Each structure stands twice: as C-alpha cells, then as structure tokens.
Image (spheres, rainbow, N blue to C red):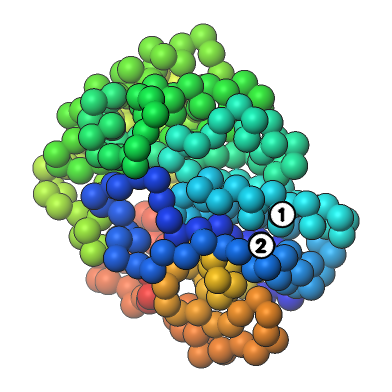
Amino acid sequence: RPEETTAYTILTTTHCNARCPYCFEKGRSRVTMSPETARQTARYIQSHCGGKPVSLHWFGGEPLVNPGAIRQICGLLQEEGIAYHSTITTNGFLFEDGLISEAKTLWNLKNAQITLDGTEAEYNRIKAYVSPLENPYRRVMRNTEALLEVGIGVVIRLNVDADNADDILLLTGELSRHFEGRKKPKVYARPIEDDGCIRDEQALFPRLCRIEEQLRCGGLKGKGGLKPSLPLHHCMADSGSSVLIAPDGQLGLCEHYTDSDFFGHVTSPEVDRAVLESWKRRRPELPACMDCPFYPECIVPEKC
C-alpha cells in the first residue's frame, strides 16, 4: 500500500446542465464547491502527496458548471510547485474555445471522457439540456474536434440500452465517417445499468457486439482484452493511493458514492478506518469463476 495519495477525483459540483434519465446521481444532494473549499482542497493535496506528481480527475455532476474551482486548485498547486496533470469526465457541452485553451495550459488536461447517447435527435432528446442556446449534439461534436486539435485526448463513451441500441449502431457509422482523415477519439460502448441490473441483457448483448465490431472497423476502438499484468486492485476505491473529494470537502473513495460512505474531511486529520477497511473486502467468487478466463485478473470489491 502506498503511503502517499497521488490520485484525486474532485467533484467541483453535483449540479448538471443535462437531465439524463439514467443518471446514477438522481435524487442526491446538489452542492457546488466554494472558493474556500477549493483552497482547502489544494492544501489537502499538498499535504498528502508527499511532494510527488499528482493526477487530478474532474468529476461531477458536470464539472464544467464550476470551472472556477478547477482554475483555483490548479493555480494554487502551481504556486506550491506541485507537479500535476488532469483528466475530466464531462458531457462536453460547456467546453468553449477559451476554456479549452485554459484546460491545455493551466489544467494540464490530458484526456476528456465525453458521453454520447445516440445520433443527433436521439442525443438531444436524452440529454435534455437546460436552456441550450444551440444544437447540443453539434456543439459537443465541435468541442470534441477542438479538444483533439490542441492535443487533448478524447474518449467517447456510448451509453447503450435496449431502446437506443439500434440508434447507437447508426451513430458508430456516423462517427467513423465524421472522423475519417482527422484526429480520432477512442470510443467504447457500455450498457446502462438500473440499480446494478442491465435490462433485456440477453437481447442487448449481440447488439453490443455489433457496435464493438463497427468501432473496430472504423478505427475508433481502443485496446481491449486481457491486461498485460495481474492487477493488485480493482479501481480507485481499493488502490490505497486515491481519494474522492466532494464539493463540500468530504473525503470518499468511490465516484459512485458521492453522498455517503465518507471517511473524513479535507480540513481534519481524523479518519474513519472502518470505511477505509470496508473497501478492501472482496466479493466472494461464484462457481462460474473457476472456468472464466478473466478470473486471474478479476478483483471486485464487496461494495462495488
């Protein structure tokens, strides 16, 4: 277990400018990080990274609803001589040209993950942005191109369920044609879960396979398959080197637990060891695990 914390997932806000019906944060509290909490966050990072370079992941809600917190944290770390780079999970709508330039220079942004839910009409319907001033789908595509042009990598996540799978298949073809001859994003598809369950899983799986195959043929599919070495942990929650910082300064371990299971606060040295230990417990194996080729690299925390 590492002694230093070198990876930070920071929620600048839990507000969002989109209203996706599948959002896993639906019904949770809405909080925006204040300038004072941003200062406390930067101080916490400085005191826990051991002088080592840190990785910052901007998350939400929609983190670009509150870019001021990102600007402040990066500026303070820069003043203290802490080396850092960052990534972001965003819907991409608010990435205007000036913000992209700032992300490249001040944020040292290396990668942005942007979600698409379908072709233009379907995407605009599902996202249901709050008071958009222009066509959201076209704006997000334009912002994706702009990010790629300045050297920021883009990963597009396709959220798929039984209702939009056919439309997502059309979208993969559109993306292949759109980025032909240009800098390309990496694209992957994931089924939408409802309380941990995938609706119509048996019918959805072959359609997911067709989507993945079309992404490969279009040169958009990232690397997949078995990992090159055996993992020592599953994700940020059981890594020992990563924490989540909520907008109010609460400390957690998982980006899916943004309203509970906190183990501390950025202003306090006190730590709830029971919460930390709860993320180290591994889910019991199933009989089917014994014959699964992925079993040697499979680690699933009990709380996942």
Closest to the observer, 283 or 119: 119
Seen as rendered, the residue at the extreme top is 181
Q: Residue 146 in the image: x percent, y percent?
A: 57, 23
Which circle's residue, 2 or 1, is located before the other in the chain?
2
Q: Is residue 273 left or right of residue 124?
A: right
Q: Residue at x 30, y 61 (%)?
A: 26
Q: Residue at x 51, y 27 (%)?
A: 143
| Quadrant of the frame with the C terminus | bottom left
- Tell me the quarter of the picture where residue 54 sits: bottom right
Q: Residue at x 48, y 31 (%)?
A: 186
Residue at which label 1 appears: 72
- Tell me the quarter of the picture where residue 157 sits: top left
Residue at which label 2 appears: 35
| Quadrant of the frame with the N terminus | bottom right
Please say if 237 is above or below 228: below
Please say if 197 is above or below 209: below
Q: Residue 8 in the image: x percent, y percent?
A: 63, 62
Query: Nearer the observer, disc 2 or disc 1?
Result: 2
Q: Residue at x 68, y 80 (%)?
A: 267
Please say if 203 is above or below 181: below
Using the rendered image of the protein, determine whether residue 296 is visible from the camera's viewpoint: no
Q: Is residue 162 left or right of residue 16?
A: left
Closest to the observer, 298 or 49: 49
- Tell me the quarter of the picture where residue 118 sits: top left
The answer to whether marks 2 and 1 mark residues whose Cβ atoms lie closer than 8 Å is yes
The secondary element bearing badge 1 is classed as helix
Name which residue type carries label 2: Pro
The secondary element bearing badge 2 is classed as helix
Name which residue type carries label 1: Gln
